[in-house]
Amino acid sequence: MSAAIEVTDATVRYGDVLALDAVSLSLAPGRICGLLGTNGSGKSTLFKTVLGLVPADHGSVRILGHTGATARRRGLVGYVPQSEQVDWAFPVRVRDVVMMGRYGHMGRRRRARPADREAVDHALARTRLSDLADRQIGALSGGQRKRAFVARAIAQNADVLLLDEPFAGVDKRSESHISELLLQLRQEGHTLLVSTHDLAQVPALCDEAVLLQRRVIAHGDPAEVLRPETLMEAFGIHTDGRGAAWTP
Amino acid sequence: MDALTAVTEWFTVPLGFDFVRRALLISVVAGVACAVLSCWMTLVGWSLMGDAVSHAVLPGVVLSYMFGLPFAVGALVFGAGSVALIGAVNRTSRVKEDAVIGVVFTAMFALGLVLISRVPSQTDLGHILFGNVLGVSDAAIWQVLVLAGVVLTAVWYKHRDLTLYAFDPVHAHAMGINPRLLETLLLGLLSVTVVVALQAVGIILVVAMVIIPGATAYLLTDRFERMLVISAAVAAAAAVAGVFASFHMNVSTGGLIVLAQAAAFALAYLASPRHGVLWRGRTARRIRARAATG
């Protein structure tokens, strides 16, 4: 069986800056993998590489055994953006955003069929946004906004989901709701790569964790990866062990 | 003469003239085509690009006159060409995009000025720069109608993809929908609409037609489909008001059309029910209250 995400020896440079250094990463289907690292550790670049937005100078990406382009065309890849990357004043309703997740399933004009509307309603219900479906996307709270994009991914029904900081700027209740949703998605066989600053979430949510600092420093059981010794060794911290490097 | 008759005659007297009817047709068609496109221009943030394309078509228009081609041919070549040039220079140098745009469109415009000064007097610089909607030829009318038809058809067919591109190009890419292709389509449509609107308001004011209606509609609604309708309605009303008023006042038609659009924008800016500055405090309180309960 092919790995859900298989990154082999990927090196990415922006000009003179080495963003990813020979990163290899294999993620089995049906797992949640936490992607951990400080700002500038290459998390975003790794996401972009997996999404095919940034070409690797060296190395390759395969998704469920396919090349990136084939996987995207077949709708295998879903994506939940960071809040900062979204124009919240854009004149679309929550329902419109979730419907965009269906575009890969539609014809060239992207006209919604009954099956698409059902998928959207279902995704809205699962993310508890049914009552807010006709609101403009910016008229939601932080947690609701995140859930709207998770709903879009659910409507898309992609096998592999990339979530960029899904817990940033989210209140406690939304946080546990989002975690619960992600665990359900894994139960249904989806594979999730979740980048996060919030280390407290990792042990309960993730089956495995990757510690990234331009290269893969550790990959394995979250408890192992998050051991203070591993973190300190990785970052050369020899002081009080509180992991100051991890504050967002 | 009572007031009703006066109002009626304000409209019917000009309509008795063939050149007014033609001006109305051109202004409304061009206005609506530009207005529809302006919704995406506003959301993607391409106002400067609209300015650039409109100025860059000048040499194309002049060359068309020189070689006896339809004006749209040269304009399209130079419009699309300058967009491609901007993209190429932007990708291959460290200069930021706005600077590249500034360099390319002024250079093209300068080339147009130089060419005009070498061309015999049958081309009127004033008409190209400021429009001459009261004196358009049959050939020009047909070009405008065909090109506006092309734009509206393409938009009707692809509007959901264009909105997806404007909202989240990364998501488009992740679903295997090529954002580069959609960007090219949008830039191509911009070039065509600029050419359409040239006849109505001239090169200098074209940019208003691809910005103001969309920006006005953006202040009035939070739904994209409604934004398209409002934008088109604003542009059509401005075109009608501009043509009739210019007949009676004997002033520049293109100038009045754009002024009418600007007046609509000013009204929306001040008094839009949701986003008007007059009630900004009230709206902010309501949004906070909604978010808190949500």
Image (cartoon, rainbow, N blue to C red):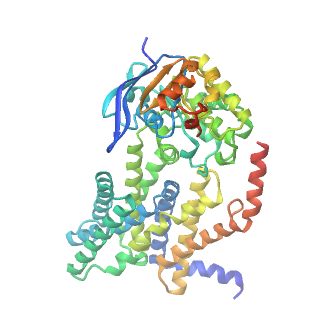
Q: Which residue occupies 61% across, 70% down?
A: B264
Along the line of sight, which residue is nearer the eye, B146 or A195? A195
- Picture quadrant of residue B70: bottom left
- Relative height, residue A229 to residue B275 (above, below): above
Along the line of sight, which residue is nearer the eye, B253 or B293? B293
Q: Which residue occupies 61% across, 47% down?
A: A92
- Relative height, residue B251 to residue B144 (above, below): below
Q: Which residue occupies 55% across, 18% down?
A: A224
Q: Which residue occupies 59% across, 22% down?
A: A206
Where residue B117 appears, as percent x and y from the top left, is: 23, 81
- Picture quadrant of residue B26: bottom left
- Relative height, residue B177 to residue B183 (above, below): above
Where residue A223 appears, as percent x and y from the top left, is: 58, 19
Relative to residue B292, is residue B200 drawn left or right? left
Where residue B115 appears, as percent x and y from the top left, is: 23, 75
Q: Can I make out residue A244 in this image?
A: yes
Relative to residue A172, is residue B174 drawn left or right? left
Relative to residue B264, is residue A71 drawn left or right? left
- Quadrant where the C terminus of chain B sits is top right
Q: Can I make out residue B142 in this image?
A: no
Relative to residue B65, is residue B197 drawn left or right? right
Q: Residue furthest top?
A: A1
- Picture quadrant of residue A248: top right
Q: How many numbered dots are placed on residues in this image?
A: 0
Q: Residue furthest bottom?
A: B1
Where residue A66 appears, as percent x and y from the top left, is: 38, 22
- Quadrant where the N terminus of chain B sits is bottom right
Along the line of sight, which residue is nearer the eye, B203 or B215? B215
Along the line of sight, which residue is nearer the eye, B97 or B111? B97
